[in-house]
Image (cartoon, rainbow, N blue to C red):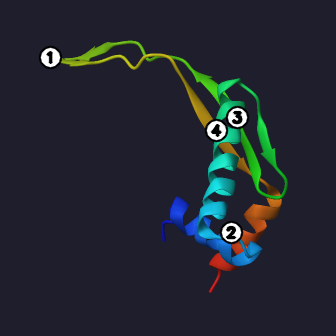
Amino acid sequence: MTRTKSDHILSVAGSCALSRSRSAQVVNTLIELIKRALERGEEVSIRRFGKFRVCDRNGLKPRTNGQEYFMPAGARRIVIFRSSPALDERINVEDLP
């Protein structure tokens, strides 16, 4: 099941007794704060959930394989997420029949 931002807004509204519009502000602000920190190259750690960090990826060199030419992939920055042991444990326990 895929959860959308809308699902999270409704969850916040239900659990915190906030209006939908106020819950949307809370969720959007949280996402914006995380994005800004990652743009600055900072690590974002959420206790008992995990860590987000930015990592530099090296580009791939072009290569030929017979007649085909593979386009190179340029160097770029990507976001890496590492889940916490507490989250891993909860996921693994909930997946068991």
Looking at the picture, which amino acid does disc 2 mark?
Val
Looking at the picture, which amino acid does disc 4 mark?
Ile
Residue that mark 2 sits on: 12
Badge 1: residue crowd in 10 Å (few <14, some 14–19, many ≥20): few
Q: Where's residue 56, x and y in %?
A: 61, 21
Q: Where's residue 29, x and y in %?
A: 67, 47
Kindly report which numbered mark, 2 or 4, lies closer to the viewer in this rendering: 2
Residue that mark 3 sits on: 53
Q: CA distance from mark 3 to mark 4?
A: 5 Å
Looking at the picture, which amino acid does disc 1 mark?
Gln
Q: Quadrant of the C terminus?
A: bottom right
Residue in view at x 76 percent, y 39 percent: 44
Residue that mark 1 sits on: 67
Q: Residue furthest left?
A: 67
SS for tag 1?
A: loop
Q: Quadrant of residue 14?
A: bottom right
Q: CA distance from mark 1 to mark 2?
A: 55 Å
CB atoms of marks 4 and 1 within 8 Å? no
Kindly report which numbered mark, 4 or 1, lies closer to the viewer in this rendering: 4
